[in-house]
Image: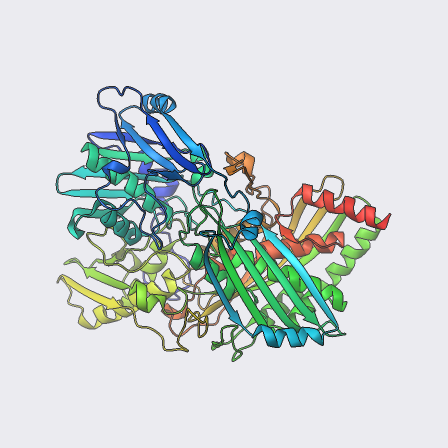
Amino acid sequence: MKLNDISTSVPKKDHKGKVSGQLPYISDVKVENMVYGVLYRSPIAYGKISTIQLPNLPAGYEVVGSEQIPGPNYVKIIKEDQPIFASEWVNYIGEPILMLVGKELNTLYRLLNEVKIEFEEHQAIYTLEDAIYRKSESGVTMASYEFGESLEIISAIEHGAHQIIEEEYDTGYQEHVYLEPQGMLALYKDDEIIVQGSMQCLYYIKNALLSALACGEDEVRVIQSATGGGFGGKEEYPSMMACHVAVAARAVKKSVMLVYDRSEDMVVTTKRHPAKINYRTSLDKDGNILSMCVDLFLDAGANEGLSSVVLQRALLNSAGVYKIPHFHAKGFVLKTNTVPNGAFRGFGAPQSFAGIESHIGHLSKQAKIDPLEYKRKYLVKQGDPTITKGNFRDPVLMEEMIEDLLYSSDYKKKKEDFQRFNQQNQRYKKGMGTSLFLHGCGFTGSGERDHIKATVKLVKTKNDHVSLKISNSDMGQGILTTLCKIVAKELDISYEQVFYPDPDTKEVPDSGPTVASRTTMIVGKLLERAARKLKTQWLSGVEQEVEEHYIHREMIPWNEKTFTGDAYPAYSWGVNFVEVEVDTLTGNVRLEKVYANYEVGKVIDERIMKGQIDGGLAQGLAYGYLEKMTSKQGKIQQKSISDYGPPTSLDVVPIDSKVFDNPYTDGPYGAKGAGELTLIGGAPAVQSAIENALQTSFQQIPITPEVIINSLWTKEGEEG
């Protein structure tokens, strides 16, 4: 099949394997001389290990702990604060202390119950509120950043302001709910450890293994298995699991499989960071914004992990899509003795956009202006500075996207109809809400140039088949298909001639992790250039190989210390409108219709993009009103999908979506990032719709039935 228009959908490369059920995932793999592993985890939130008493282990069953780690006892990520196996102190409920390995899982679980560990328990920090109160204490603040207008200037502006509005906004946990729980297998060989499993970032894992095993490059190999969803949950977390199975395999000289069941996965793996955001905004007498200060706090859990980078992106999105005069932001990553939080689709942006869209919406009430019209007054335009003194270089199509949705949704008439409906109906209330948002594509600042340094390779066989040699992982988002399309189109060969084997660090260079909406834009562009090079050298019937390296787009240099410059090379944009009906008797919210416009440069495959839109919106909307996860005394309370409550097919309503063409010069065929953008607007739009229906304000997500009922009781009390 030759490709004419790059956007036209083609059969997905993994379609047959997935639909037939023949595609093997890591838990389907069985190898010779394989044993299973189970982890003994800390039952307390914070304390010191006093004594460990092990049961009598049957023949063939062994224990693996920190003593068996050849290298340093930490998972190599950013900071050296996450032990592979806790050896002295434990910092959260669920922290791994040791692993039992053996042939039968039932026997392992019985032995696990017989392990006796005594602890000297210490006072833990259980909540973000407690961490904020104690943030000046040693070790509580893990990272902090501050930038923007000087506080002296803002203080002078506030002094002359007509009104100062202060709001506090809270966001909760979000669980990834990938279809396939975490799983990892270490294959033991005398001269090599091969780790394969469900993952997003092969070279993160390889680097962690090189550190833990204190070995050479050629002694470790990492292979991605078919991966049933990630959403960021398989970015950094698999590095720890890989260390567990690799250390165990080296110690017992057998292959070791570690697969979590759903309950274990939900209780101990990383979540989206809970956040608290404080806004202080000064207004003139007409409700116009004069200045804004934002203080943002992220709950890291027990280890820093990627939290400092999540905070950076949260702060970079703290002004939303708005040109705010005299803006100042500061943020903190704080430690609590709870499960570590980490990467999640959007990477700090969903928390910030939920907060800023809510706050701007509430300011519109002060000005007695429709929230959408108020937001449009402050929209950034091409050529405007970013909040870090960078520049929005490319065309910004937000006004066109908004106008299109105003027409297709019949926004003004709908709002009038809903108002009449609400006046006539005591129990049910209808509302319509909006959200405006963007997403910076790729790594922050010069991360691609200074840290990732991506390399890609194309290999052509004698029969003129071309294979992609890259380290990026397909986890359901469709890059097996889209990246093959880019190469086939550029080479002007059949799509069926291009292959994308399972990434294997023995075969592929480091093209960077599969995160940050960078894969299509950054890696796709490298592949496009590599294909162009191969095309000029093409010799039919001859084996050939080409390689390409990342080239940085010259912009305003990024300074991480001062938070100034161009944070991202390009931005994708979105607008969501949401209609809801709220049952004031039960507090239940029913979505009625969702409208969504996006600008992602150029779409590489229409069907895959539609999948990203529908899936991203389902996840983003649920973050706003359905999915609630809580921690009590350091322990996650929701242990099953039914306890947690992600959306089912009954919760997903018609989504009227459109993608606007705005090709980006440095993306393949003009493409930019899309995967994270589609989630970001869901929660603020649904909050806005609920507020419109009930004519009240909320300062948190998720807005669950309990939150709604409490709000209605409070409102009745105030009016009574």
Please tell me whether residue 149 is drawn above or below residue 183 in the rendered image.
Answer: below
Looking at the rendered structure, the number of numbered marks drawn on it comes to 0
Q: Position of residue 684 (x, y in %)?
A: 61, 57
Q: Which residue: 59% across, 41% down? A: 650
Q: Quadrant of residue 187?
A: top left
Out of 18 and 304, give the one closest to the viewer.
Answer: 304
Horizontal placement of 373 versus 470: left or right?
right
Please tell me whether residue 676 is drawn above or below residue 631 in the rendered image.
Answer: below
Out of 212 and 452, give the one closest to the viewer.
Answer: 212
Q: Quadrant of residue 665?
A: bottom left
Q: Quadrant of the N terminus?
A: bottom left
Q: Position of residue 601 (x, y in %)?
A: 45, 69
| Residue at the farthest bottom position | 383
Q: How is the image coloured?
A: rainbow
Q: Quadrant of residue 150?
A: bottom right
Q: Which residue: 18% across, 71% down? A: 537
Q: Which residue: 22% across, 20% down? A: 59
Q: Which residue: 26% across, 50% down? A: 206
Horizontal placement of 667 versus 379: left or right?
left
**Residue 562 visible to the viewer:** yes
Q: Position of residue 269 (x, y in %)?
A: 43, 42
Q: Position of residue 708 (x, y in %)?
A: 71, 45
**Residue 599 visible to the viewer:** no
